[in-house]
């Protein structure tokens, strides 16, 4: 037997099997319609509305590379206008890096707080729905046909014998309806109505069919576990230790989403300001490179003339030509390269929602600040520890963990409920109406309303797990979570103080570097002027002049970049102390209410009476201190005010001293070509105590006073 089994296995696994000898039929040669169909890549058909964003995406023209910026139409734009366009143009909160393409689910939008609020599982409205009145109703019909198991010898009555020998036949119906309500104190009230209909062939029945029913009221009140307004606001409808979905937990989720939304707006405003100042700096750096190229070109042309007349040297001509092409490559890189003017301008265009290119070139008109700014450290530190959205968000988490610990401790108690019921019973041949038989119980509802048959029940119900193991573990878990969140809050405040200190130091260092680079730039200007005269007189080597020209371009470039870094340092300080939105006049506002919400609030408010005596007010502990406006102007003290003063015109200004109130850029010599010099810098009036920094022009004051607002609808 084993040999036959082994032979069968060899035949089935090796060589030409029996199935291979069967000729192929149509099912083997015809390809199925579903082959390679389920995994085909298809293009989805969706509805997409035309918006300014889609129009900006489709209206982009050919990108700029090495075109002359002086021949491109200019679009003048202030910083406030750029921020206003960024926060109003799209519901998607943009960020540099294009994460919306690779990770769209991680991109912040204005819908995120509303999504958390409207979440049907964890939102506050979902938690409130646990306390909504619930109505249930049932109606069933039954047909009963059961044979009887009876010995006919024991039956003497012929009528009863005939009945019992047959089957039990009945037609039955059951109706029940209940209206129940869960209260914030944990009590459950219910009003229940039950009607049973029965028609059967049993003997000795007064009615062949009858309606039996009752109307009852029930009250279940927890006395230990599950009792109290604060407990039910935290736990909600879930009685599992460690799992809480109450209205306060939903409120914490909503506040966390609002904090994340505000942090995204702060990041957007910071990115816009970064791109704006980078663009303003790029104009000036490009202008410095262009001036260096023009200077190198003049030197190269002068050396060519000398070579043609026989007074020059070929090595000097080659050195001048090499430096010219070096500056030419630098200008091309600063114009169309990765850190160039067109690249920086396109980053700003993306943040404000404009097409990548539209035939115009954005030109910043808000002046770069070069005055020394001094912040009051004590005031700034206090604001940072109170106004930073990260601190507020972490405080929400600490409050949530405190609620969870409160609920976990109350869960470590037995479940003791008081139960009370009162019932009105009735019986009748008819459900409604009577047959004029004179019988008192002829009508079910008449029997119930007469109140002849009343019942009640009252008592206590106790249940608890022996040992309370799960509840004890939930308390330990809640304590650990609370300690963790408090530690994170303390660490967040410590980190913010360090970041604020670094930002304050950066302002001082950036301003000092700006002054040093300015003095260096003025010195290089003088050096080039002297060496150029000596070179043309033939008393000096060309190498010294070429080196001085390179140093002049480097020092001018470093000076303008230092000014940009100084403006970004001011931005970083406002961001670290939580006043960036107020500094840029950005407001967070709630969207429009739904239709009828104002009227509903008016009707609800009519039933609320203010209490003048605080001792008569009983309310749970408050979740927050009240409304907080992150865009409100702070009230500070001890702030320093620096005011620009006028300076006299001069060809080559002398190096300035430290802490001079004179604007640095106003002292620079005017460029030969005003159109290619980029935006000019005016005197600034800085008011640091009120956290404003605005140009000393009436038009700019009007623009800032009517600054952009953000709507989260």
Image (cartoon, rainbow, N blue to C red):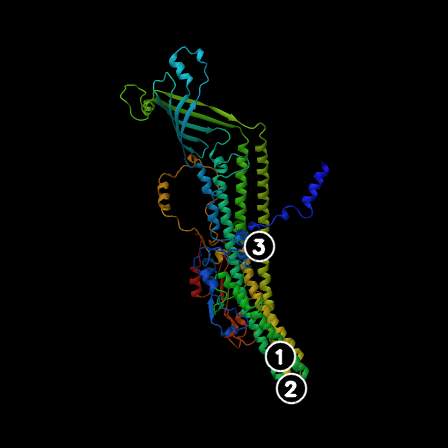
Q: Quadrant of residue 162?
A: top left
Q: How many marks?
A: 3
Where does the N terminus fall, quadrant-wise? top right
Q: Is residue 320 left or right of residue 661?
A: right
Residue 662 placement (x, y as % from top left): 53, 68
Residue 597 placement (x, y as % from top left): 37, 46
Q: Quadrant of residue 520?
A: bottom right
Front residue of this view, candidates 448 and 612: 448
> What distance separates the C-alpha of mark 1 from that of mark 3?
45 Å
Judged from the image, the secondary structure of the residue bearing numbered disc 3 is helix
Q: Is residue 581 left or right of residue 599?
A: right
**Mark positioned earlier in the residue sequence (2 or 3):** 2
Q: Is the C-beta separation of discs 2 and 3 under 8 Å?
A: no
Report the residue that reaches farthest toward the right: 3
The answer to whether residue 3 is visible is yes
Residue 368 placement (x, y as % from top left): 52, 66
Which residue is the site of mark 1?
530
Labelled disc at residue 307: 2
Judged from the image, the secondary structure of the residue bearing numbered disc 1 is helix
The answer to whether residue 664 is visible is no
> What distance separates the C-alpha of mark 2 from that of mark 1?
23 Å
Q: Is the C-beta separation of discs 2 and 1 under 8 Å?
A: no
How many residues crowd around disc 1 within 10 Å: few (fewer than 14), some, or many (20 or more)? few
Residue at 57% across, 52% down: 29
Report the residue that reaches farthest toward the bottom: 309
**Mark positioned earlier in the residue sequence (2 or 1):** 2
Residue 102 placement (x, y as % from top left): 55, 56
Report the residue that reaches farthest toward the left: 436
Circle nearer the viewer, 2 or 1: 2
Front residue of this view, candidates 420 and 577: 420
Which residue is the site of mark 3?
500
> What distance separates the C-alpha of mark 2 from that of mark 3?
60 Å
């Amino acid at each position: 037997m084993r040999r036959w089994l082994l032979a069968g296995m060899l035949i089935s696994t090796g060589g030409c099997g029996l199935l291979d000898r069967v000729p192929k039929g149509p099912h083997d040669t015809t390809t199925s319609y579903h082959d390679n169909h389920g995994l085909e890549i298809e293009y989805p058909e969706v509805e997409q509305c035309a918006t300014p964003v889609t129009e900006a995406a489709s209206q982009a023209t050919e990108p700029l590379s090495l075109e002359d910026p002086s021949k491109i139409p200019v679009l003048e734009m202030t910083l406030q206008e750029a921020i206003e366009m960024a926060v109003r143009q799209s519901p998607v909160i943009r960020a540099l890096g294009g994460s919306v393409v690779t990770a769209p689910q991680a991109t912040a939008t204005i819908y995120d707080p509303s999504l958390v609020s409207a979440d049907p599982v964890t939102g506050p409205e979902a938690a409130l729905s646990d306390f909504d009145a619930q109505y249930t109703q049932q109606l069933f019909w039954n047909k009963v046909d059961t044979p009887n198991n009876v010995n006919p010898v024991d039956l003497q009555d012929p009528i009863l014998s005939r009945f019992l020998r047959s089957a039990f036949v009945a037609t039955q119906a059951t109706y029940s309806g209940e209206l129940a309500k869960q209260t914030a104190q944990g009590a459950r009230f219910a009003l229940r109505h039950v009607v049973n209909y029965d028609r059967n062939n049993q003997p000795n029945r007064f009615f062949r069919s009858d309606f039996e029913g009752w109307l009852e009221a029930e009250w279940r009140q927890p006395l230990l576990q599950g009792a109290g307004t604060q407990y039910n606001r935290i736990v909600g409808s879930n009685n599992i230790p460690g799992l809480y979905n109450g209205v306060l937990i939903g409120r914490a989720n909503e506040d966390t989403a609002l904090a994340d939304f505000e942090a995204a707006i702060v990041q957007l405003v910071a990115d816009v300001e970064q791109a704006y100042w980078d663009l303003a700096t790029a104009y000036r750096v490009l202008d410095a490179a262009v001036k260096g190229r023009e200077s190198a070109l003049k030197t190269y042309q002068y050396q060519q003339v000398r070579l043609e007349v026989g007074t020059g040297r070929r090595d000097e001509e080659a050195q001048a030509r090499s430096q010219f092409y070096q500056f030419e490559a630098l200008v091309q890189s600063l114009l169309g390269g990765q850190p160039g003017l067109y690249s920086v301008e396109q980053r700003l265009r993306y943040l404000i929602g404009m097409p990548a290119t539209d035939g115009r070139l954005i030109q910043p008109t808000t002046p770069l600040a070069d005055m020394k700014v001094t912040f009051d450290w004590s005031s700034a530190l206090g604001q940072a520890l109170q106004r930073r959205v990260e601190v507020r968000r972490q405080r929400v988490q600490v409050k949530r963990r405190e609620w969870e610990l409160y609920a976990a401790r109350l869960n470590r108690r037995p479940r003791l409920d008081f139960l009370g019921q009162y019932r009105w019973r009735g019986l009748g041949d008819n459900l409604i109406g009577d047959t004029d038989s004179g019988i008192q119980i002829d009508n079910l509802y008449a029997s119930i309303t007469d109140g002849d048959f009343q019942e009640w029940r009252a008592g206590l119900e106790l249940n608890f797990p022996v040992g309370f193991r799960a509840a004890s573990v939930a308390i330990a878990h809640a304590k650990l979570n609370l300690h963790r969140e408090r530690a994170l809050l303390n660490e967040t405040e410590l980190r913010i103080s360090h970041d604020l200190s670094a930002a304050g130091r950066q302002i001082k260092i950036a301003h000092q570097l700006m002054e040093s680079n300015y003095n260096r730039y003025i010195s290089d200007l003088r050096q080039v002027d002297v060496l150029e005269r000596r070179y043309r007189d033939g008393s000096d080597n060309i190498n010294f002049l070429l080196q001085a020209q390179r140093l002049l371009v480097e020092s001018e470039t470093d000076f303008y970049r230092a000014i940009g870094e100084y403006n970004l340092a001011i931005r970083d300080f406002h961001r670290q102390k939580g006043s960036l939105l107020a500094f840029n006049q950005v407001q967070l506002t709630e969207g429009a209410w739904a239709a009828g919400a104002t009227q509903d609030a008016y009707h609800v408010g009519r039933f609320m009476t203010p209490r003048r005596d605080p001792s008569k007010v009983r309310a749970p502990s408050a979740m927050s201190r009240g409304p907080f406006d992150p865009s409100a102007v702070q009230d500070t003290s001890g702030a320093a005010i620096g005011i620009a003063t006028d300076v006299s015109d001069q060809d080559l200004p002398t190096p300035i001293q430290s802490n001079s109130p004179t604007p640095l850029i106003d002292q620079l010599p005017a460029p030969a070509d005003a159109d290619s010099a980029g935006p000019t810098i005016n005197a600034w009036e800085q008011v640091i105590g009120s956290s404003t920094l605005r140009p000393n022009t009436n038009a700019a004051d009007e623009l800032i006073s009517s600054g952009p607002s953000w709507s989260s609808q």
